[in-house]
Amino acid sequence: MYGRAVALGAGTVLNALSTGVGSAFAIDAETTATVELDGSATVTGSVAEDADADTRLIERCVELAIEAYGDDASDGGTVRTESDVPMAAGLKSSSAAANAAVLATADALDVEPDRLEACRLGVEAARDVGVTVTGAFDDASASMLGGVTVTDNEVDEVLARDEVEWDVLVWTPAERAYSADADVERCANVAPMAELVADLALDGRYAEAMTVNGLAFSAALGFSAEPAVEAMPHVAGVSLSGTGPSVVAVGDDEGLDAVRELWDARSGHTWRTTTRTDGARIL
């Protein structure tokens, strides 16, 4: 009983920590999960990029997917992920891993699941193991469905989904930031700005929404806004992604090339990608 699936990383339009409403867009960075079910009653996970990585999330995803799609005979097995999405960098690595693990388990069980239902299982697993404050349904839905989504994370509902075709520039410094460690109280202080960002996003003004979000949450989460400020004259939108530390910008080639020169002067890794509209899939 063997299955494989792939899910996407994502960038942030609106951080959901302030109000529970969030928005994210899928990018062309993939996480692949391989699941083998053996009836052993125990799920064991591994991460190709880090032998010491916390595997509780992907293990819990497999457990929940077996409960949803399988039976006692299929209980237990192994799950392994391989990823282009840097971990703890604000680019939704956990959501991508969760989505891929759930879909790979469904594949092992020869089930073609509803993608939003599968997405909610991954979100449930993330809450169960404590790797997220909000449940990250915004991030997970963008990773699963592709395009840009706006969601209410308190009830795990998609408020809007749109297909966007953007060129994307990402700057990822060496430091790492874990979503579960974010200062929720400080984020609550910028709720009025988050409400404005939600209004912009629901009006389809995603790039403008990103920029407002980036300024507000850089301040709330203690990151410098300087990378975003120096990018603003050149791009359509720029934001701190997730709870950081990555910064993402969207725009045309000329503008992103100009920003890349500025960001390349900073320590860390700068890379180009694009948005994706196809979302996660079983392989």
Image (cartoon, helix red, strand yellow):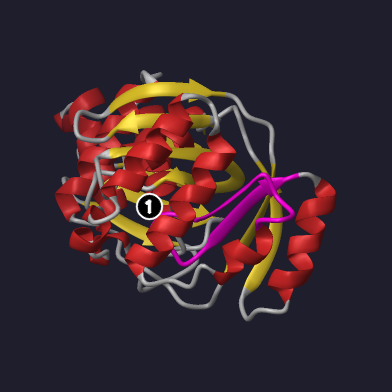
Looking at the image, is 11 positioned above or below residue 118?
below
What is the crowding at mark 1: few (fewer than 14 residues within 10 Å), some, or many (at least 20)?
A: many
Residue at the disc numbered 1: 94
Residue in the picture at 41% in, 54% down = 242
Camera-nearest residue between 222 and 233? 233
Residue 240 colored magenta? yes
Q: Residue 278 location, x and y as percent?
A: 59, 27
Q: Is residue 32 left or right of residue 126?
A: right
Q: Quadrant of the N terminus?
A: top left
Q: Position of residue 121 (x, y in %)?
A: 26, 34
137 vs 211: above or below: above
* Residue numbers of the magenta segment: 232-251
Instruction: Give 280 or 283, whichever is nearer the viewer.
Output: 280
| Residue 126 as seen in the image, left or right of residue 193 | left
Q: Position of residue 167 (x, y in %)?
A: 72, 43
Count of numbered circles in the view: 1
Q: Residue 70, can we see it?
A: no
Q: Is residue 139 above or below residue 264?
A: above
Q: State whether residue 77 appears in this view.
A: yes
What secondary structure is marked by label 1? helix
